[in-house]
Image: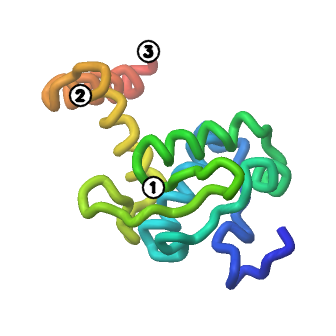
Amino acid sequence: MSETRANNPMAGFQVDHSSGLPVWIQVKNRIAYLIGAGKYLPGDKLPTVRALAVDLDSSYNTINRAYMDLEREGYISTRRGKGTFVLEQKEIGAARAYDTPVELLVDDMIRGCIEAGLTDEDIVALVDERLLRRRDGR
């Protein structure tokens, strides 16, 4: 990107293709973290999907998926012909400055489970079962 690190919180961010975490989730988590940490403020314009895809050597669809999820969760808003902008964050559901990428991933998993109709107890049981399988090598 042509912007300096001070003007562009995404400068220096690199996707880790060997992490096993999908690229769109890495991008989404990074932007959510930067918003929660105050590196992007309400009203700030984000890089275009195309520009970020080029900068991160990723596909347009991958970055677009991250942006769409961030918009669905209330972090950003896209205005056709104007760009994508950071929204004022509500207290509930907004990333906190101390959230780690793993915590944000767990939040996404919990949100997905709830949307699928699972109760808190179901989610805990599912995680327990998956951990047990992992330990047993199944």
Question: Residue at coordinates 69% horizontally, 37% vertically from top-left?
Answer: 62
> What's the distance in space between the residues labelled 3 and 2, CA to CA?
20 Å
For disc 2, the marked residue is 123
Image coordinates for residue 117, horizontal then vertical, percent? 23, 20
Q: Earlier in the sequence, mark 3 or mark 2?
A: 2
How many residues crowd mark 2 within 10 Å: few (<14), some (14–19), many (20+)?
Answer: some
SS category of the residue bearing label 2: helix
Could you tell me the amino acid type at mark 2? Answer: Ile
The answer to whether marks 2 and 1 mark residues whose Cβ atoms lie closer than 8 Å is no
Question: Residue at coordinates 36% horizontally, 63% vertically from top-left?
Answer: 89
For disc 1, the marked residue is 75
The answer to whether marks 3 and 2 mark residues whose Cβ atoms lie closer than 8 Å is no
Left or right, residue 109 beside residue 49:
left
- As displayed, is residue 68 above or below residue 121? below
For disc 3, the marked residue is 138
SS category of the residue bearing label 3: loop
Closer to the eye: label 1 or 3: 1
Could you tell me the amino acid type at mark 1? Answer: Tyr
Image coordinates for residue 133, horizontal then vertical, percent? 37, 20
